[in-house]
Image (spheres, rainbow, N blue to C red):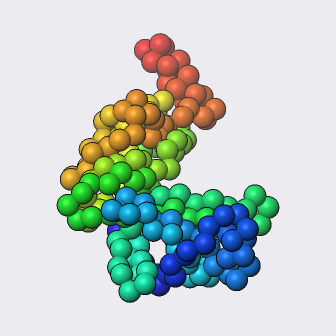
Amino acid sequence: MKNLQFNASPRADFGKKEAKNIRKTGDIPCVLYGGEEVVHFTINQKDCASLVFTPEIFSVELTIDGKKYMSILKDAQFHPVTDQPLHLDFYQIFEEKPIVMEVPVKLSGLAEGVKAGGKLSQELRKLKVKGFYKNIPESLTIDVSKLGLGKTMQVGSLSFDNLEIVTAKQAIVCAVKLTRVARGLAAAAAKEASKK
């Protein structure tokens, strides 16, 4: 997992009016949970664009008032019209304590079903996993080369080293769907077989 570092400023005043004033200065109100205490702070909006506008995942080292905290971004609220971040929730992480987070899924290989004329469809873009943050990869690569025509791959059939998958086992990760071409080829093959 890649790491980002931010210098943040502690925040003492709360409420909607104060949050609005913070945003006017180009900062975002943030909260850090998961540690001994809840920490309220602000981050510069331009600084955190690389964190909030990407499908990638990062561990985030926050320096607040000279104190360092390791964290992950747990939640982000955006303005419905401008898409500007309005509020960020961070979760403090520790080396000896496992965390649950969503990791992007990447499919690799050419599925057998695609060779037979089917179309590969990715149903899940992320999987929720549990593990120590140092073991959590930037993405989970899944080999689909053995996936046949009309077949699906469920979460329950997957496993990754040092990680526990939290996503429901029956959830479908990807499928090779029948296309008109594939149906035509299958019908032609069946017709041919019946002649013999």
Residue drawn at x 27%, y 45% is 164
Residue 54 visible: no
Query: Considering depth in this image, is 127 or 121 the residue closer to the camera?
Result: 127
Query: Considering depth in this image, is 10 or 63 the residue closer to the camera?
Result: 10
Residue drawn at x 32%, y 43% is 165
Q: Position of residue 159 (x, y in %)?
A: 26, 44
Report whether 70 appears left or right of 194.
Answer: left
Report the residue that reaches farthest toward the right: 81
Compared with 67, 188 (above or below) is above
Query: Considering depth in this image, is 44 or 102 the residue closer to the camera?
Result: 44
Compared with 121, 25 (above or below) is below
Report the residue that reaches farthest toward the front: 13
Q: Position of residue 173 (x, y in %)?
A: 44, 41
Residue 61 visible: yes
Q: Quadrant of the C terminus?
A: top left
Q: Quadrant of the N terminus?
A: bottom left
Report whether 89 appears left or right of 132.
Answer: right
Q: Position of residue 73 (x, y in %)?
A: 47, 63
Report whether 14 appears left or right of 39.
Answer: right
Q: Position of residue 122 (x, y in %)?
A: 51, 45
Residue drawn at x 67%, y 69% is 19
Compared with 96, 109 (above or below) is above
Quadrant for residue 70, please give it. Answer: bottom left
Residue drawn at x 72%, y 76% is 21
Quadrant for residue 81, please give it. Answer: bottom right
Give the number of callouts.
Answer: 0
Query: Considering depth in this image, is 45 or 135 the residue closer to the camera?
Result: 45
